[in-house]
Image (cartoon, rainbow, N blue to C red):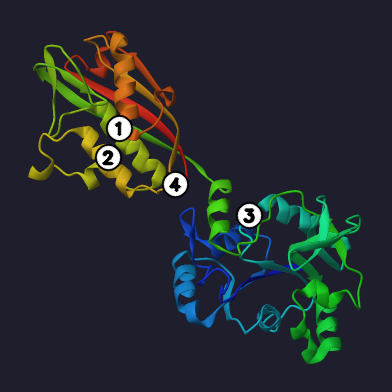
Amino acid sequence: MKKIAIIVAAGEGKRFGSFKQNKMLNGKPLFSHSLDVFHDSKKFESIFLVVHKKISNEIERYVSSKKYKNVFIVVGGKTRAISVKLAFNKIKNKKSKIFIHDAARPLINNELVDELIAISKNRSILIVAKKINDTVKNVENNVVKRTVDRLNLWTAETPQIFDYKKLEGIYNKLGDNFTEYTDEAAMAETFEKVDIFENRNLNIKVTDKKDIRLITKIKRTQKVGIGIDFHTLIEGNGLVLGGYKIPCNYKSKAHSDGDVLTHSIIDALCGALNLGDIGEHFPNTDEFLNISSIDLLKKVLEIAPKNLTFVNIDASIVLNDPKITKHKKKIAESVANALNISESLISIKATTTNGLKFLDMENGWGAEVIVTVEV
């Protein structure tokens, strides 16, 4: 049986205060978190994304730019029930399994979708829900009237899954009265057996702006970038590493201060965040002549996501002379201060070329850095 998804993103966001489905969450619109899970699973013949008419053009441009396959935009109605029905009416395959999901639940993942696909094979109607484990109170005017027996109480979530024929039959029986129901499972309960899948994972529904902030903390992605930089050594009065100057008879030949460590950190961070490279941001122009590389690093932080968290910085310095072992702590402190992080997250290692001629580093030095961040 073919599988078809309906993702509902057509609400006005009255409690949220604006349209929530296109609000950014960890670098992409809220609705796209659910869309990406269903689309990337490659298990759905068609995906119908139901959106509000006022933002339909914006969402359609986004969908087109990402080159999704078999994703169709449907302009929704005044209520959720009408929006789902409008998408249902677009389905041509009457031997399909319909997965209905609220875009306001962005924590859905591929593992849950795979489980639901497997268990729904032998069930005509299946909904995701959570068993209530907290004590439940019946309250009127902010006064507790009684404690409710929670033994058989569950909270319904999405996805909700229907055989096409079952959902079609329910719509036929209800006629125009289908608009009175808050979800499709509620429509089905009078006529059909509705099975429950207990979801033990977080499946928060975004209702107000606090939910966005909460999910941002939960739904974080770890990213890794690699940076590498080399410069020629010439006669001078010191080498700058991570913003810390090591006294010696060399300096780095460069447009800026030639800080290979900080340059590598910048490139690694840009790589992790897909921000291009150091040369794109800071070309060899008069503006950046002899500038401190630490200042360049701070400029990159200004364009980085506000929720950026450093997990680890692992740096290897290639330098024959001078030895930097006794300077490692000061170097780490300088980098940590620039990034406003703990120096415990920074590993500084040093190596030489061990006399290997093919590396030809007698008159040069370099650094390689791996940066791990969460956004």
- Tell me if label 2 and label 1 are in contact, CB under 8 Å: yes
Q: Sequence order check: which comes first, mark 1 or mark 3?
A: 3
Q: Identify the residue shown where x is 23% and y is 20%.
A: 365
Query: Which disc number belongs to residue 338?
Result: 1
Element type where label 1 sits in the image: helix
Measured in 3D between alpha carbons, the distance from the residue under mark 1 to the one under mark 4, in whole angstroms, is 17 Å
- Tell me if label 3 and label 4 are in contact, CB under 8 Å: no
Where in the figure is residue 103, as x and y percent of width and height?
A: 61, 66
Where in the figure is residue 35, as x and y percent of width and height?
A: 59, 63
Q: Identify the residue shown where x is 40% and y is 49%.
A: 305
Measured in 3D between alpha carbons, the distance from the residue under mark 4 to the one under mark 2, in whole angstroms, is 15 Å
What is the quadrant of the N terminus in the image? bottom right
Residue bearing mark 3:
107
Query: Which disc number belongs to residue 298?
Result: 2
Q: Sequence order check: which comes first, mark 3 or mark 4?
A: 3
Does residue 326 sit above or below 304 in this rendering? above
